Image (cartoon, rainbow, N blue to C red):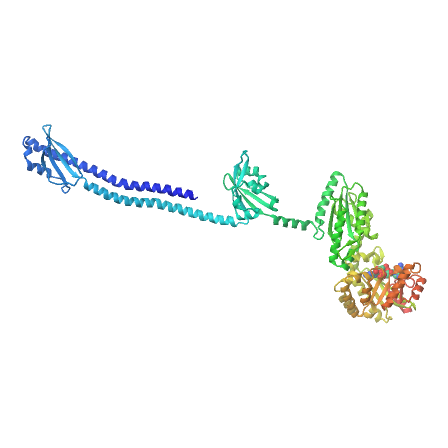
Amino acid sequence: MKGDARSIVRVTSIIAGIFAAFVAIVIPLGHFTISYQFLMGSLDAQADLSSRNINSIVHDSPNMWQFEQIRLIEMLERRPLGNIPEQRRIIDTSGTIVAESADRLTPPVVAKSHNIYDAGRVVARVEICRSLYPILSQTVMLAFASIALSIIVFIALRTIPLRAVRKAYASMEESEARYRSLYESMNEGVALHRIATGPGGEATFTVIDMNAAAELILNIDRNSTVGSDGAKVFGAAIKDHLPDILSAAKSSGTISFEYPMESISRVLSIAIFFPSPGAFATLIEDVTDKKRSEEQIKRLAYYDILTGLPNRQLLQDRLDQALARATREGGKVALMFIDLDRFKFINDTLGHAYGDLLLVQVSLRLRDCLRSSDTIARLGGDEFVILLSYMGEELNAAHVAQHLLEQAALPFDLGTRQVSTSISIGIAIFPTDGLDGQALLSSADMAMYAAKERGRNMYNFFSQEMNVKAHERMELETSLRAALERDEFFVEFQPIVTARTCKVVAAEALVRWNHPEQGRIMPDSFIPLAEETNLIVTLGDWVLRTVCRKMKQWADSGVPPLRVSVNVSGMQFRQANFVDDVAKIIGETGVDPRLLELELTETSLMEHADATVKSLFRLKELEVGIALDDFGSGYSSLTYLKNFPIDRVKIDRSFIKDVCETPDDKAIVEAIIALAMSLNLYIIAEGVETPEQVAFLQARNCDEIQGFHFYRPLSEEKLLELLKSL
Ligand SMILES: Nc1nc2c(ncn2[C@@H]2O[C@@H]3COP(=O)(O)O[C@H]4[C@@H](O)[C@H](n5cnc6c(=O)[nH]c(N)nc65)O[C@@H]4COP(=O)(O)O[C@H]3[C@H]2O)c(=O)[nH]1
């Protein structure tokens, strides 16, 4: 740019100089020439005129005219331009001055002459002289003025265009500076390249400029890079695309691509465009973080955060692909639904942190049992799904399942604790057990439930009967909901007697369902489902309210006071407002709370022990009795037993069943009775069916007995009749 400016200055100066010189020379020269010619013309004309006048004198006296001095001089002095100094004279042929006017002239002098004739013969000539001095002095004056004018012309012609050029350059520089500051402050890197031809005729490119962002992104120094081969700077990033770049250059199109540049451990987004012929610009953006967040989003969308395994979404994709492939190639696909046995209990007793740790370890161990082509996904909670493609034989799936069971049963080291668990596996095979992913998944789920029902820690293949059973379950759930609305439930009461006197002292309220088609349905068939579907909360509330209302009616009608126990499900007990609901029911029905006893299972009390203690104490404040149901069947904890405000423990009927035959059961029952007595708790034995069992319990000082040996569950009327007959 500076070189261009210098040449513009030079050319402009030369042109201005030429013009100035022209003005300085041409004006005085022109003046002189014109004045001179005018002078000479005028002298010539006057000489001619004078010669003609003198001719008449010569003609009048051809021999004596030379002596007519006065007339001649007078004639010479007759001038049209009287005030201009002139010298006029008549010179005869011998060169003698015949007559002469008197003016003296300042040299230089110019003259013009004309002949004087006598009868066609030249006898003399008239010569008129004038000084050139006035013209010369005018010319000199004019030359000075012209020089002054030429200086002005030179200045004008040089300065005005140069000022415009300078202004244009200044605004160009300003705009360039603006663009450069923009260019330098861009977050995107920009590099400019010139396309060249290498020694072998191949296309190469040279870096001609780059901005600060490009330096930073590419981790290079621009000073040492500018002018070097672009392939060395950008590696294969641009070189690989050079043919495309060259063809795009012809059409002035743009090219963009992403390139993972390993040398700087960054992913670059590169856009190439063509600002001028033979050159191209590279717009470089560091998209490493963007790529990382995209990966992260993808991971969140398709992978489980805790275990890093594929989630339901990704499983669905892989399942669809596997099924499509199996359909095309006639292969099989096995889908395993896996659930950790008693995970909830582990989670609740050890805490969620350990629960999470266990899930991670289980996922790692299960994954280690699989081939890389298999997929293991976590659906959530403790549910995993394994997808095995191309199962030649179902036996293969059984082998894998067996291996998984064995591995999952080995203890897990959770840092400060060792935990043992097991898994239950349901297996569904494509195409026999389901034609799409959803169907296969629900078949595998049913098979897994069947494995759990069979006693956990085992695998189970799906069968059509399970489908039927599941269908029945669904129907049961629907009708269970309807039953609550249609008031199809009723309560029976099983009397409880004292072991010593066999006198009825209490009764247990047991719910039944009067199904419109199936008739009486016992609680074992619907309570588990009601617990799974949360319906137990409404049902339990109904039972408690019904029992309390009846007890109040009995009391009002003079029936002797009878303690009645009501079963409370774990889920019902865990409701935040359970104690408030009990208080409300007691308040609303007006029942004597001292006659009401709530039966809670060991397991439901063990979960969330802290909250349990609080609720139990609040129940005790209501003066409600608390019994521990099915005692001995769960994970009994003596600490809890000691800390919980319990009134009674009920020995599980599974121990009573063979108490007289099996020494183990006998020992357990004796231990439970001894323990309860030492803790000052009343003991009820349930499921007592034989006189031997009664005798055994009486001998061990058991407090109360409940069982078919004395009474089966009775309708309300029968119970009232019984009470009246006592
Ligand atoms: N074989 C045999 N069985 C005996 C004998 N004596 C009593 N039983 C049965 O043992 C069960 C005692 O109730 P549970 O252990 O609380 O076990 C109850 C309880 O866990 C649950 N249940 C019943 N009603 C309710 C209720 O209103 N709410 C809740 N949450 N659960 C209930 O259903 C379970 C089963 O109730 P039921 O079928 O009425 O069965 C009753 C009763 O009929 C005996 O000598 N031999």
Is residue 471 at all visible to an observer of this figure?
A: no
Please indicate whether residue 167 sits to the left or right of residue 215 in the image. left
Provide residue 575's location: percent of width, then percent of height. 75, 62
Please indicate whether residue 420 sits to the left or right of residue 111 in the image. right
Of residue 133 and residue 182, the one placed in the foreground of this image is 133
Of residue 565 and residue 614, the one placed in the foreground of this image is 614
The quadrant of the picture occupied by the C terminus is bottom right
Q: Which residue shows up at 86% across the image and 66% down it?
A: 676
Residue lying furthest front: 224
Provide residue 206's location: percent of width, then percent of height. 53, 40
The answer to whether 97 is drawn above or below residue 370 in the figure is: above
> To which quarter of the image does residue 107 belong?
top left
The answer to whether 646 is drawn above or below residue 40 in the figure is: below
Q: If the picture is divided into quarters, which one holds ligand 1? A: bottom right
Q: Which residue shows up at 41% across the image and 44% down it?
A: 5
The answer to whether 368 is drawn above or below residue 205 in the figure is: below
Provide residue 168's location: percent of width, then percent of height. 41, 46
- Count of marks, rendered view: 0
Please indicate whether residue 160 sits to the left or right of residue 441 in the image. left
The quadrant of the picture occupied by the N terminus is top left
> To which quarter of the image does residue 506 belong?
bottom right
Of residue 325 and residue 3, the one placed in the foreground of this image is 3
> To which quarter of the image does residue 50 belong?
top left
Is residue 314 at all visible to an observer of this figure?
A: yes
The answer to whether 657 is drawn above or below residue 43 in the figure is: below
Provide residue 623's location: percent of width, then percent of height. 80, 70
